Amino acid sequence: MKKIIGAILCISIGLIIGFVVFGRAKASGKIPTITNNPSPTISKTKFSMASAPAESLRGIVTQLSGQVNWQSRIATSSAKLVDTVLIQQGENIATGDDGLLSVQFASVSAVMLSADTEVEVIQTLPISVVFNQLYGKAQYSVLADSPVAVRILNALVNIKSGVVTIEIDGETGLVMLSQESGASTIAYNSPEFISKVWDIDASEGFEYNSVNRKGYFR
């Protein structure tokens, strides 16, 4: 009972003090006001499925012959490529058994697809161009100081400079790399999951078996 009476007294004293403070503030004209700050404006994202980021490079078709297919960023299937199309990152290009295609991305890099070849254009930023070669034969050229990366099945080739030709046998998983000029590195995990990195210089060749994850110079 004493605890209840004490609690009632504390509440009463608090109310009295509150009324006194409010009365003095009202008399002095200094009643605090509560303002609602507007929520910060959230800018809309500039991401577009149809168009790659503005800072990415667009590839210009410099050579086109035979059957060549192209799949845009928003397409669900490929269509015949015409030379007026600009190739963007996130797109896919493929040649038929008589096809030939060359694409240049500004003064940074270029790629040439031989017949029966498929390449995904992963990224085309000026400082980082990345391709994914699925099968066939393609030649990659580094035209500036920025390297070009090419994923080949379960390995990665980093082309530091010069020109490299990569040929992938889609049935056997065998990869043949020819360093025509400049220098590159190839990296992959061995069957024991040990990282292997090899430097390839001009005029050297490298063979990589993606099935048993083993490679050697030839």
Image (spheres, helix red, strand yellow):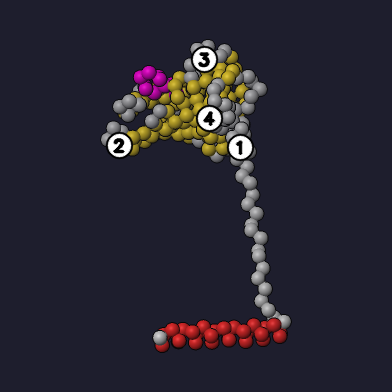
Residue type for callout 1? Ser
Q: Residue 55 location, x and y as percent? A: 61, 39
Q: How far from the left and from the top, in percent, is residue 68?
A: 56, 17
Disc 1 marks which residue? 48
Give the mark, 2 or 4, whose residue is nearer the N terminus.
4
Q: Is residue 25 above or below residue 81?
A: below
**Residue receiving disc 3:** 96
Give the spatial CA distance, label 1 vs label 2.
Answer: 38 Å
In terms of depth relative to the viewer, which is nearer, 101 or 202? 101
Give the structural element (helix, strand or loop) at label 3: loop
Write the residue at 58% across / 29% down.
Answer: 74
Find out whether residue 171 is within the magenta segment: yes
Residue 144 in sight in this render: no
Span shown in magenta: 166-175
Mark drawn on residue 121: 4
Instruction: Determine the CA span between mark 2 and mark 3.
Output: 36 Å
Q: Which residue is label 2 attached to?
A: 193
Res 46 → quadrant = top right
Of callouts 1 and 2, which one flags the residue occurring earlier in the amino acid sequence?
1
Q: Earlier in the sequence, mark 2 or mark 3?
A: 3
Q: SS at mark 1?
A: loop
Amino acid type, callout 3:
Gly
Closer to the N terminus: mark 1 or mark 3? 1
Distance from the alpha carbon under mark 1 to that under mark 4: 17 Å
Q: Nearer the viewer, residue 106 or 119?
A: 119
**Badge 1 local density, few (<14 within 10 Å), some, or many (20+)?**
few
* Horizontal and vertical percent position of residue 143: 56, 31
